[in-house]
Image (cartoon, rainbow, N blue to C red):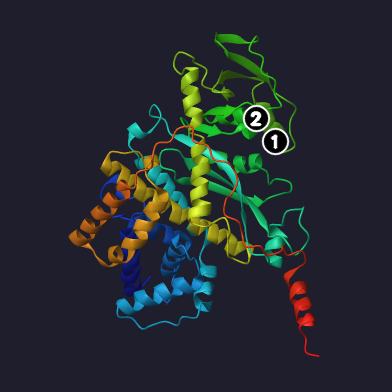
Amino acid sequence: MANANRKTTRKQVKQMCAQFGQWGGEALNNVLGAEVVLESMRRHVGAFRQRVYSPLSTLQLFVQQVLDADGACQDAVARGLSERVSAGKQPCSLNTAAYCRGRGRLSLEWMVELGWQVGRRLEQALPAQWRWRGRPVKLLDGTTVRMPDTPENQAVYPQHGGQEPGLGFPLARLVGLISFCSGAVLGFALAAHKGKGTGEQSLFRKLAPGLEAGDLLLVDCYHCTFFTLALLQQQGVDIVTQQNACRVTDFRRGERLGVRDHVVYWRRPARPEWLDEHAYELMPQQLAVREVRVGGWVLVTTLLDAKAVSKEELGKLYHWRWDVELDLRSIKEVLGMGELRCKTPPMVHREISAYMLGYNLVRAVIAQAAGAAGLLPQQLSFKATVAVLHAFQEQLRHHVGNCGRALWAYALAAIASAKLLYRPNRVEPRAVKRRPKPYPRLMVPRAVARARLLDAYAPI
């Protein structure tokens, strides 16, 4: 990389870091350090020409685009034009074609690694008092996202089987591993919503290597299986989950620890198709698990010591699993990832990676604000944080030194003031009050409906 090119790239990296308060000082201010970005670029991007939409400038605009309420390519290009003019550079065109080609040139591995690096470095930088007994708590859950109805997307991510061709949208299943303490995404796996190897358990097995010894995993009853528990036990990971409805819990059996609290031994089932014979033989013949009834649930865990962890503590701990639903809602509803915009599968994966990187950067900002205010990240509003970042982003990008740090201190104070109310046991019906406009449903492909309209209004 030429000296002029390297100098420009470093300046762009510093601007991107400054926008999210990554000044490189304390641990929470260095989850997206300049050296991390440059080293990742060296591995995945290599040499490149410093054009209007270079890899780094395109990535910056892409992340800002997914964090913006509009989310349109035209808005991203207009922002890029504004930045070039304010920096004294030659204006670029408002045509979005060059920007879209620049997004298509971005290295997917680079984008995924940057999001992963931010999440992991943030998890490592968290204060010990934010953890459960000093242990990292991680959450896992799945969701689906829709994308434009194009032949390319339909081929890889087919629509729901209950919809007629041309009337539905391609669906993808997404499973994410999320930190409870920070809310950051530590890894994600993507597949079609149906077909062999596309279920949540299959995608979980792709994410399992990202777990570390000493972690505590909270999952729903879908993952309450012998092989999931055995796999985690081999990695030194404990689990708390809800009992699967297919399994009968009889508290008269096993080693009694208390009222409706016992340890039982699950026998190894027959080998499933996805597990090879060698890995199957390494699985234990039986598995010691603890089953407790608390708070209306039957919970299953590998935390076997009732004196160290009471069943009441297990009940409180499992309540935290709901946070993964809130985190996924923040990504899908607040940021808008529930309805993707890209029209080909490779770009869909890049778009999701941009969402995950932007989401993790926002979570790093929330962690900074919580640490400065003596709060927990779960107490601060994600939506308010995004709004504050939008309000301060231009000033933060173009002010450095003491002026920039002073602006950032005000931004963190504003974020910390948006404290969420404590509302235990809150419930809401899964129904909406606001009625949509009374348009009829489209029951034939749009092209057919358009042709019928043209025939109806054709001149005589």
User: In this view of the protein, which residue sits in the foreground, 402 or 272?
Assistant: 402
Residue 28 can be seen, yes or no: no
**What number is the disc on residue 46?**
none
Give the farthest residue toward the bottom.
460
Q: Is residue 38 left or right of residue 148?
A: left
Residue 305 percent location from the top left of the image = 49, 15
Q: Residue at x 70, y 45 (%)?
A: 197
Which image quadrant is residue 53 in?
bottom left
Asked if residue 230 is positioned above or below residue 156 in the image, the reply reads: above
Residue underneath mark 2:
227
User: In this view of the protein, which residue sits in the foreground, 40 or 420?
Assistant: 420
Q: Secondary structure at mark 2?
A: helix
User: In this view of the protein, which residue sits in the foreground, 365 or 124?
Assistant: 365
Residue 72 percent location from the top left of the image = 50, 69
Label 1 vs 2, first from the N-terminus = 2
CB atoms at circles 1 and 2 under 8 Å apart?
Answer: yes
Q: Residue at x 71, y 38 (%)?
A: 274
Amino acid, disc 1:
Leu
Residue 152 percent location from the top left of the image = 69, 65
Amino acid, disc 2:
Phe
Residue underneath mark 1:
275
